Amino acid sequence: MKKIALFVEGQTEQFFVSKLLQEIAGQKNISVTLYQLRGGSKSPKQQIPVSNSLYSSQSPIATHAVLIYDCGNDEKVKSDILEEGPSLKAQGYSRILGIRDLFPLLRTELTRLERGLKFIPPHYQPLPLPHDIIVAVMEIEAWFLAECHHYSCIDANLSPSLITSRLGFNPDVEDMTLRRHPSQDLDDIYHLVGKAYKKEKKQVQRTVECLDYAEIYLNPKLTQLTELIKQIDAFMGV
């Protein structure tokens, strides 16, 4: 069985990546296990199981296994990867992938951040497993903004034309990675029809379940999302 571990900064990323993997692979072909990683440095590190029937999947005939860690914040994605690497290798994992946001840094700081993410302190070398970290500029919600099919699922009256007329930008044609605060944009959009988007379990699940994963897979608009899909395809052997 092929195994990959993903380290993401929070619940939103954890739910989205799990759903994307299951949609690409098919639920019968993949097992997904979710954990929160908490503590470290000043307190013992804990791995807390996340029980969620929508995003955890244990198939007896799975050919691929995925472990997704919610690290709690963006700064911990890299450090948790480095710390957990040896244990994951011992458990038979062959690759690690990290996903984090750039926000609240400025887009002009992306290059500096990416250089920092690639630097491995000497005491962690050599790395036990190959890894990559994808920066979902500015927030992962930029990917949600760009997937315009999901708006009518949120509300039948919500459309790119309404968004353009009321908020002054068009998520269907503009580059959503240029938006400064995508999660706030998503909240503003949903408010047009009397709804909201907050990084809370029910609202995150609503959006994640409304996304059109066939559209995301076949026509990814954003470079970072394309890279994530490429990594998943490589893991699945597509």
Image: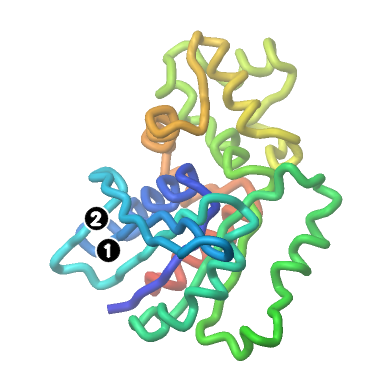
Residue 33 visible in image:
yes
Way the structure is coloured: rainbow
Disc 2: which residue: 57
Query: Residues at badges 1 and 2 in contact (C-beta under 8 Å)?
Result: yes
Crowdedness of circle 2 by 10 Å Cα count: few (<14), some, many (20+)?
A: many
> Where 148 falls versus 27 (above or below)?
above
Q: Give the quarter of the figure containing the C terminus.
A: bottom left
Residue 173 is situated, as x and y percent measured from the top left of the image, at 68, 33
Residue 160 is situated, as x and y percent measured from the top left of the image, at 59, 21
Left or right of 83 on screen, residue 123: right
Residue 229 visible in image:
no
Q: Which mark is residue 96?
A: none
Q: Earlier in the sequence, mark 1 or mark 2?
A: 1
Residue at (43%, 28%) from the top-left corner? 203
Residue 193 is situated, as x and y percent measured from the top left of the image, at 51, 10
Three-letter amino acid code at the position of disc 2: Ser
Residue at (44%, 34%) from the top-left corner? 204
Image quarter for residue 172? Answer: top right
> Where 218 falls versus 128 (above or below)?
above
- The mark closer to the camera, 1 or 2, is 2
Q: Give the quarter of the figure containing the N terminus.
A: bottom left
Residue at (47%, 51%) from the top-left corner? 217
Residue at (43%, 21%) from the top-left corner? 154
Q: Secondary structure at mark 1?
A: strand
Q: CA distance from mark 1 to mark 2?
A: 7 Å
Image quarter for residue 170? Answer: top right
Residue placed most toward the observer, 26 or 135: 135
Residue 186 is situated, as x and y percent measured from the top left of the image, at 59, 26
Crowdedness of circle 1 by 10 Å Cα count: few (<14), some, many (20+)?
A: many
Disc 1: which residue: 30
